[in-house]
Amino acid sequence: MPKSIIFIMFFCIISMMACQNSQLDESLLIGKWKAVSWDVEGQQNGRDASSVRFEFQENKTYQAQYGTQQEQGTYYIMNGKLYTTEEGKAQKNVLLSTLTKDSIVMQMNRMGTLEKITLLKE
């Protein structure tokens, strides 16, 4: 087999693997979630993770709470990211590095600071 054909086959296989859609199962998001850890730049930051709660509904709406702050709006998942749009606000997104039936790990870049929140299903 000529080298050019082997190269083309190798390139096609790599391309197919890269293009495999790593879409997350959005149905796993449905339910109530409570944060158990909140790291900033890989370190515990003293923030009260237990005051962070999310609830995602099947109708693509959500409610979130952090202490006394509350928000609600709509959401969707695309390309491994959770996009939320709070009522009357701009859209924001976080990377969902983990989404299982009982845990979520959200990674975000807040003004240049990397943060990671781990949530467990209530």
Image (tube, rainbow, N blue to C red):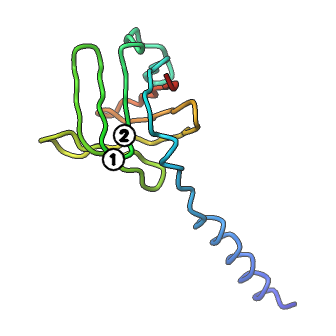
Report x, y in % for residue 109: 37, 36
Determine crowd level at label 1: few under 14, some 14-19, many 20+ residues with C-alpha closer than 10 A: some
Q: Is residue 97 above or below residue 71?
A: below
Quadrant into which the N terminus falls: bottom right
Report x, y in % for residue 7: 74, 81
Horizontal arrangement in the rendering, residue 59 relative to residue 89 (left or right): right
Residue at x 53% of width, y 40% of height: 97
Write down the quadrant of residue 58 in the picture. Answer: top left
Which residue is at the far front?
Answer: 58
Which type of secondary structure does the marked residue at label 2 adopt? Answer: loop
**Which residue does the numbered mark 1 point to in the structure image?**
60
As rendered, which of 60 and 10 lies closer to the eye? 60
**Which residue does the numbered mark 2 point to in the structure image?**
57
Report x, y in % for residue 43: 49, 17
Between the C-alphas of marks 2 and 1, the distance is 6 Å
Which type of secondary structure does the marked residue at label 1 adopt? Answer: loop
Determine crowd level at label 2: few under 14, some 14-19, many 20+ residues with C-alpha closer than 10 A: some
